[in-house]
Image: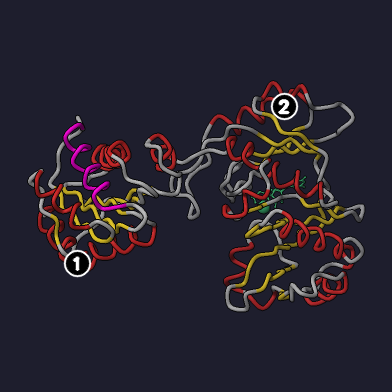
Amino acid sequence: MNLMEYQGKELFRRAGIPVPRGYHAAAPARAAELATPDVPEWVVKAQVLMGGRGKAGKVKFAKSPDDVASVAEEIMATPMPPNRQNPKGERVNSVLVEEKLSIAKEAYCAIAIDRTTKRPVIMVSRFGGMDIEEVSEKHPESIAKFFVDTAIGYSPFIGRELAFQAELDPGYRKAFPAIVGGIYELFFRYGAKLIEINPLALTSDGRVFASDAKVELDDDALYKNPEFKEWQETLPLDEDEALAAQAGLGTRNFRRFDGNVGTIANGAGLAMATMDAVRNAGGNFANFLDVGGGANAERVRNCYELVVNHTGAKVMFINIFGGITRCDEVAKGIVEALNTTKSRKVPLVIRLTGTNEEQGRKILADAKMTPVETMDEGAARAVELAA
Ligand code: GDP
Ligand code: MN
């Protein structure tokens, strides 16, 4: 789960990482209402999950509460334009309004998991700001890294060392070790995959603030912090995620692609293997779909309808491995689902193997559906039928 900037900054506050004074507002009028006259200038920032807001004109300054309202209006009027990170763009549903900082320097600071060393890696660069991707491509040596031994943990000397190696402006020195300590603490407390501050701003009067916040939480660790459930509900779903949720699937269980072989499998691994098999057979898959645990008629019907109604599938390849889910149950589900669906019919190719396979095949045979023997055979048949 990726957090919006305002949510990330809420976590920063909890860890004592300095963030600018500010508030979150879902409507321009509300943004203006909360703007207190003691602040000479504000910055109004689109709250979206995409990055690159600055370059897209979605971070703007305002000098009065009226100005805050009109700038917020302008930012919310159009979606974030597509970029490399999100080719569909993203609607702007709210803004974060903050006291504008007088920024003298912009640094970069992040913590993530390094898969090679299997350790958290802290990364620091003196070239923070909107061109950090370019920095990591063209001057990777300018990024200082420290791979943390989690048995020992973080100590302030690590932050001092990193600031020195990255040649951060001396103005950062005093505040920096505690800020890195803050992100290290949050990383573990909330089970994050990435915490990034870009820019970490040094103001002209010598203060250091996290001016932006990017936090990615590990979905498998969400159960440890039930409070995130509420946040999750406020986050936007993309089209595929919304379709999956409507069909009663998890938001990650369905993805559309542009081929014509529809796929349904149980387990994300088998679902991906099924797509590979289609590709190996010279075809193109229309989707990824993991039916998840259980496969009763309603669930199979929902999945079938989801694929035929929302992708370019000309054929459906159903690939089930019966483990805890028994093949006879799945077969019953498939037969019932196809007898009751009102959606368009496409040819079916079914591979069913595992627990209670014999009974499952019999049920399919009785319904005049013949399963194939192997995944590759099924893929080849499906590709042929789609051609
Ligand atoms: P991003 O482009 O989506 O990463 O959004 P950021 O939050 O990083 O904002 C983009 C840029 O806007 C930053 O790199 C800053 O240069 C600028 N910016 C944001 N807030 C302030 C502020 O309070 N004062 C000044 N002077 N610039 C700001
Ligand atoms: Mn940023």
Residue that label 2 marks: 31
At label 2, which amino acid type do we have?
Answer: Ala
Residue 323, relative to residue 343: is it above or below?
A: below
Q: Where's residue 218, x and y in %?
A: 60, 55
Foreground pick, 9 / 336: 336
Residue 38, relative to residue 180: is it above or below?
A: above
Residue 20, relative to residue 353: is it above or below?
A: above
The answer to which image quadrant residue 198 occupies is: bottom right
Query: Is residue 385 found left or right of 236 in the rendered image?
Result: left
Q: Where's residue 365, x and y in %?
A: 10, 49
At label 1, which amino acid type do we have?
Answer: Asp
Q: Mainly helix, strand or loop, the magenta region?
A: helix
Magenta stretch: give its range.
326-340
Residue that label 1 marks: 376
Query: Is residue 302 found left or right of 156 in the rendered image?
Result: left
Q: Where's residue 175, x and y in %?
A: 89, 60
Q: Where's residue 351, x and y in %?
A: 20, 57
Which class describes the residues within 10 Å of circle 1: few (<14), some (14-19), or many (20+)?
some
Nearest to N terminus: mark 1 or mark 2? 2
| Residue in the image at 18% along x and 38% along y | 338
Identify the element where label 2 is drawn: helix
| Residue in the image at 48% along x and 50% along y | 86
